[in-house]
């Protein structure tokens, strides 16, 4: 059966909370409020009542301060994730295609994303889909995460930034 790919609605919050990893310190209600405000759109892939993949496209452009200077008009795909057992079946490609179509409908001519140097499989996928290396070959993606002792720590992943003309 083909998964249904669409943007998330407020009525999806319970399903999202159950099936998707949230950003640390941020609820899906907040994500959807930001969607209502036009900051981003959250795409979900639904199969038999479960979310098996998801991704955000950030209309405000790249989150990184250098990337946004370089590519202010290129919405950023981020928080892209396909549930483990559904990987390598083309779903990540379909989620990216859906976000790309939304960007085109929005009058955009490019999309962008950052990828960790330790994630060569995702990098290869993006290259196959037409993303190209940009001059931003090294930057740190920083995000908060909970430590085992209940504290909050900041992770810094070395990434490269890719752009695709659409
Ligand atoms: C990166 C990620 C989103 C890709 O999603 P995916 O659904 O596996 O992607 P696709 O299936 O479209 O493409 C990936 C692979 O499947 C292959 N593929 C594509 N369509 C296929 C199909 N119909 N049948 C079999 N294989 C297929 C591709 O050739 C590719 O090959 P690989 O397994 O050698 O890499 C997923 O692996 C993931 O969630 N990873 C963990 C989180 C993450 O790294 N997110 C990205 C952060 S930048």
Image: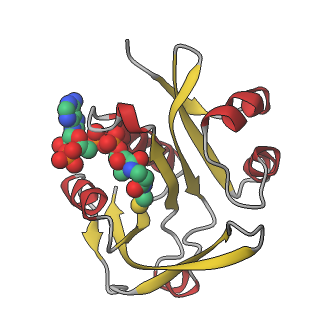
Image quarter of the N terminus: top left
Task: Determine the image quadrant of residue 131.
Answer: bottom left
Q: Is residue 122 above or below residue 33?
A: below
Q: Is residue 15 above or below residue 54?
A: above
Residue lying at 68% horizontally and 69% vertically, measured from the top left: 147
Task: Determine the image quadrant of residue 111.
Answer: bottom left
- Looking at the picture, tell me which residue is in the foreground, 103 or 107: 103
- Looking at the picture, tell me which residue is in the foreground, 85 or 75: 85
Q: How many marks?
A: 0
- Looking at the picture, tell me which residue is in the foreground, 67 or 90: 90
Residue 162 image offset from top left, x and y in percent: 34, 70
Q: Is residue 6 above or below residue 43?
A: above
Does the rendering let one see residue 109? no
Residue 96 image offset from top left, x and y in percent: 40, 46
Residue lying at 42% horizontally and 65% vertically, measured from the top left: 112
Residue lying at 26% horizontally and 38% vertically, measured from the top left: 88
Residue lying at 79% horizontally and 50% vertically, measured from the top left: 27
Q: Is residue 113 above or below residue 79?
A: below
Task: Determine the image quadrant of residue 128.
Answer: bottom left
- Ligand 1 is found in the corner quadrant, namely top left
Residue 2 image offset from top left, x and y in percent: 38, 17
Image quarter of the C terminus: bottom left
């Amino acid at each position: 059966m083909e998964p249904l790919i669409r943007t998330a609605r407020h009525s999806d919050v319970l399903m999202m909370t159950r099936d998707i990893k949230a950003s640390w310190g941020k609820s899906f209600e907040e994500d959807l409020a930001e969607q209502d405000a036009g900051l981003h759109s959250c795409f979900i892939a639904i199969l038999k009542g479960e979310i098996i993949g998801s991704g955000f496209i950030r209309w405000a452009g790249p989150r990184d301060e250098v990337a946004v200077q370089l590519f202010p008009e290129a919405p950023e795909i981020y928080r892209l994730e396909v549930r483990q057992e559904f990987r390598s079946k083309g779903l990540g490609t379909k989620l990216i295609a859906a976000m790309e179509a939304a960007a085109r409908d929005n009058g955009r001519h490019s999309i962008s994303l950052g990828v960790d140097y330790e994630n060569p499989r995702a990098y290869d996928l993006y290259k196959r889909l037409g993303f190209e290396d940009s001059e931003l070959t090294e930057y740190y993606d920083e995000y908060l995460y909970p430590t085992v002792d209940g504290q909050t720590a900041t992770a810094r992943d070395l990434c490269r930034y890719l752009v695709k003309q659409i």
